Amino acid sequence: MAKGFEISTHQREILVDITPQVQAIVQQSGIRDGLVNVYAQGATAAIMIQENWDDSVQTDVIQLLQKIIPRGVWLHDQQDGNGDAHLKAGLVGPGESIPIIDGALGLSRWQNIFFCEFDGPRSSRRIVCTLVRS
């Protein structure tokens, strides 16, 4: 079963917590035990599981990626100026798989699911959740 949802982003680079939306899809599915794959559609976006308690972690992730993959120095920048966004998305990856345990996401207390925007702002970004019953 696959279900999707859309979000908008308001910065060029930002991590957006999408855990509530994914949890709602899991609960609506009725699946008690299984797996949910969360996938970001788009070549300049990614999905990351990261700490949810301290917002500085998300800022640190963005700043690290900006340091190791700077803007404006890539061949693709000659096309549309977002070569760094493609590389960041490729490095982080488009999806994550999370176990479903007793109808809930099998994340630890300190983990949430983040949509990683590397080429915003965007009025619409689509995330697809594919659920499998075990």
Image (cartoon, rainbow, N blue to C red):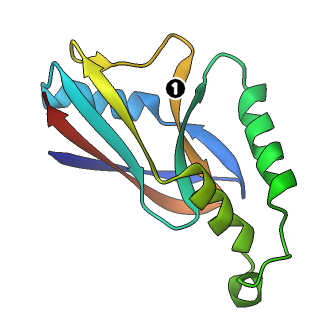
Tell me where residue 57 appears, x and y as whole percent.
74, 28
Q: Is residue 4 left or right of residue 62?
A: left
Determine crowd level at label 1: few under 14, some 14-19, many 20+ residues with C-alpha closer than 10 A: some
Q: Is residue 71 above or below residue 49?
A: below
Tell me where residue 122 appears, x and y as whole percent.
58, 62
Q: Residue at x 15, y 18 (%)?
A: 32
The quarter of the picture where the C terminus appears is top left
Judging by the rendered image, the residue that carries numbered circle 1 is: 112
Q: Residue at x 80, y 60 (%)?
A: 69
Residue 28 placement: quadrant: top left
Tell me where residue 132 appears, x and y as whole percent.
17, 37
Residue 34 placement: quadrant: top left
Tell me where residue 11 appears, x and y as whole percent.
71, 54
Q: Nearer the viewer, residue 80 or 120?
A: 80
- Label 1 SS: strand
Q: Residue at x 78, y 36 (%)?
A: 59
Amino acid type, mark 1? Asn
Q: Is residue 74 above or below residue 88?
A: below
Q: Residue at x 29, y 17 (%)?
A: 104
Q: Is residue 31 visible?
A: yes
Q: Is residue 119 visible?
A: no
Q: Nearer the viewer, residue 119 or 11?
A: 119
Q: Is residue 91 left or right of residue 23?
A: right
Q: Is residue 35 left or right of residue 88?
A: left
Q: How many marks on residues?
A: 1
Residue 33 placement: quadrant: top left
